Image: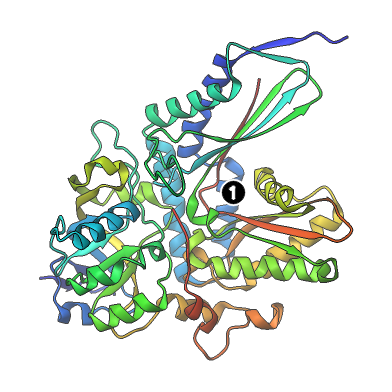
Amino acid sequence: MSEVREVPTDQLAAVVRELCMEICYRVPPEMVELMKRAREREESPLGRQILDQLLKNQDIAAEGEYPYCQDTGYTVVFLDIGQDVHVTGGDLYDAIDRGVAEGYTDGYLRGSIVRDPLFDRKNTGDNTPAFVHTRIVPGDQVRIQIDAKGAGSENMGRHAMLKPADGLEGVKHFVLKAVAESGPNACPPGIIGVGVGGNFEMSAVLAKRALMRKVGQPSPDPLYAELEAELYEKCNALGLGPEALGGTQTVLAVHVEGMPTHIASLPVAVNIECHAHRTGVRTI
Amino acid sequence: MPVEPQGDGRVRISPPLTDDDVRSLEAGTVVLVRGVVYGARDAAHKRMIEDLDAGRDLPFDPAGQIVYYVGPTPERPGNVIGSAGPTTASRMDRWTPTLLERGLKGIIGKGGRGPAVRQELKRHTAVYMAALGGGGALSALTVRSQRVIAYEDLGTEAIRAIEMDDFPAWVVNDAAGRDFYAETIRPWRRNDLLPDDLHLEEAAGKAIEERGFLGGG
């Protein structure tokens, strides 16, 4: 029988606090590389100017610990808890919210969450509650991935229950249409996360998980990798370009994740991430 | 001078603006905004309209002025403002005509506007401009001062007087009815690689113009 490892909630809260601040000032290094690559590939002169500005924004944010974007997002947390872990010292989800609250307050980040969508749109002030997806996995570690997700791109997400007869072409079309319609609102160039299969809600979560993949890394499944490459090319053929003021660089990467589904279903979800891709991972 | 061409294609604008000032600004022009603009987004707009409905005055007179759709991050001690880029403009579409009727001449946000607002901009001789979306750290560098002037309880969504020093933006919808997004995207669309319904042909980005954009930030 394996040993049980104790992980105190205070330790989790401290990691969440630190991650919230760090990601809002610094995008991951691979994101910086993809933005530079887009700058090299962009054919529109205006598009190149905009990418120069965005690269400058990246530097100012990182150097001055200034939030990259004033929409410091909602906090989505992907938590993988080893089944040999015993979380001690109080409620796990309270600890995550404590970390978010401290990170957003101490880091001068904007609270952007309202208490109720319809009946009480009052800002909670500290960006809580976080939206948490938990999985129990083998092992004795806790993996925490956080994304500070802006609403400009989030609001351009699309979901559909396609027919199996729509097939691969139907999915491609749906993705392209979603990106075309997102226009300037999703602050291109960004990352396109696509979830296919599962059921109604799993496809949406899968699209978000697709965004959590190390950006630009192709799917390990060659069929999905090929689909990603084709969608990357076609999304860029839409011509939106940086800030949708025209150009060849509309997306930096397309990530597609698939999973088993019902014989009658073809669920598809598209979740768009802007160029402010603020994510980070820690393992405890 | 409310409108000063800079000789490099860019134009400095300083509110208050007249109808003639606005008419001189064409879609695609890069403007440098200097002077005081009013920061207001979703919750502030909702409350302004509620105030008017209740017979109260607006917290500021919009005549000739510019509204900036912004909800900045809290500033660190010693800084003038936190990160302060634009938010998605189309969410304010419902409330914009009321401010245009009261003489608002300029709006700064990001993303496109719906057909009704584009028509009202034309009717009231006003202009919609887009700033760099998601470049809030850079945007903050051109802010000289800010103070909350109303609705303090709304926090980041309070109304602010923001003093700008050559804050850059593009004219998207000019008073002649042009739409810069529709014009700039069209030549870059590769119809040969795309399904038929996503083709953009002669009709200057018709699919985009008709639908407008909805979003957040």
Pointer 1 chain: A
Looking at the picture, which amino acid does disc 1 mark? Glu
Q: Left of A116 or right of it: where is A164?
A: right
Q: Left of A174 or right of it: where is B15?
A: left
Q: Position of residue A233 (x, y in %)?
A: 69, 67
Q: Position of residue A264 (x, y in %)?
A: 86, 61
Q: Position of residue A9 (x, y in %)?
A: 58, 16
Q: Position of residue B152 (x, y in %)?
A: 22, 42
Identify the image's colour scheme: rainbow, by chain, secondary structure or one colour.
rainbow
Residue at the far bottom: name it.
B202
| Residue hosting label 1 | A33
Judging depth in this view, the residue of A217 and B70 nearest the camera is: B70
Determine whether A117 is above or below A47 in the image.
above
Question: Dot 1, how many residues are within 10 Å of its Cα: few (below 14), some (14-19), or many (20+)?
Answer: few
Judging depth in this view, the residue of B27 and A208 nearest the camera is: A208
Residue located at (13% from left, 76% from top): B18
Observer able to see residue B10: no
Residue located at (57% from left, 88% from top): B201
Q: Left of A97 or right of it: where is B69?
A: left
Residue located at (25% from left, 64% from top): B32
Quadrant of the rendering where the N terminus of chain A is positioned? top right
